[in-house]
Image (cartoon, rainbow, N blue to C red):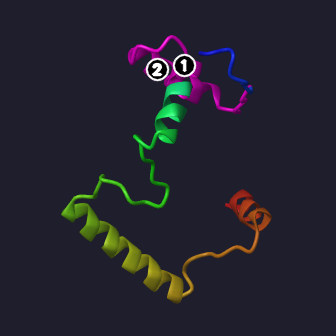
Amino acid sequence: MNMSIPTVKLQIPLAKSLRDKVEKHARAQGFSSIQDFTRVMYSTVVREKQYFSLNGEHEDRLSPEAETRYAKQLAEHEMDRKAGKVKSFDSVEDFLADLKQA
């Protein structure tokens, strides 16, 4: 890294298990550290050579069988919700209280 360029330190809280998996992946790809891996990822994104989608548009698709199965499950859930068989909560506290009762 060119030290004549002003730098900042970025700290990102991660679960240790996630950090360990990323480190293993980075090393398998030939990087000496997670930091080097992260720098390359950021640089690549900035150069617009890598695209990330956070809105669900990606190449991975469900099989037609899975699409049919999930559509059926969703329809069944909607019928149960309309029939009053699905619980609804106004807050996390209410949800957690209900879990403790179960």
Residue 48 drawn at (x, y percent): 44, 44
Residue at disc 1, secondary structure: helix
Q: Magenta part of the protein: which range?
A: 9-38
Amino acid carrying label 1: it is Asp
Which quarter of the picture shows residue 70?
bottom left
The residue that appears at 38% across and 80% down in the rendered structure is: 75
The residue that appears at 39% across and 60% down in the rendered structure is: 57
Amino acid carrying label 2: it is Ala
Residue 36 drawn at (x, y percent): 54, 19
Q: Is residue 37 above or below residue 53?
A: above
The residue that appears at 32% across and 73% down in the rendered structure is: 71
Q: Residue 26 or 48: which is nearer the viewer?
A: 48
Q: Is residue 22 above or below residue 80?
A: above
Return the mark for residue 24: none
Question: Which residue position holds label 2?
Answer: 26
Residue 5 drawn at (x, y percent): 68, 22
Residue 1 drawn at (x, y percent): 59, 15
Residue at disc 2, secondary structure: helix
Which quarter of the picture shows residue 76?
bottom left
Question: Which residue position holds label 1?
Answer: 36
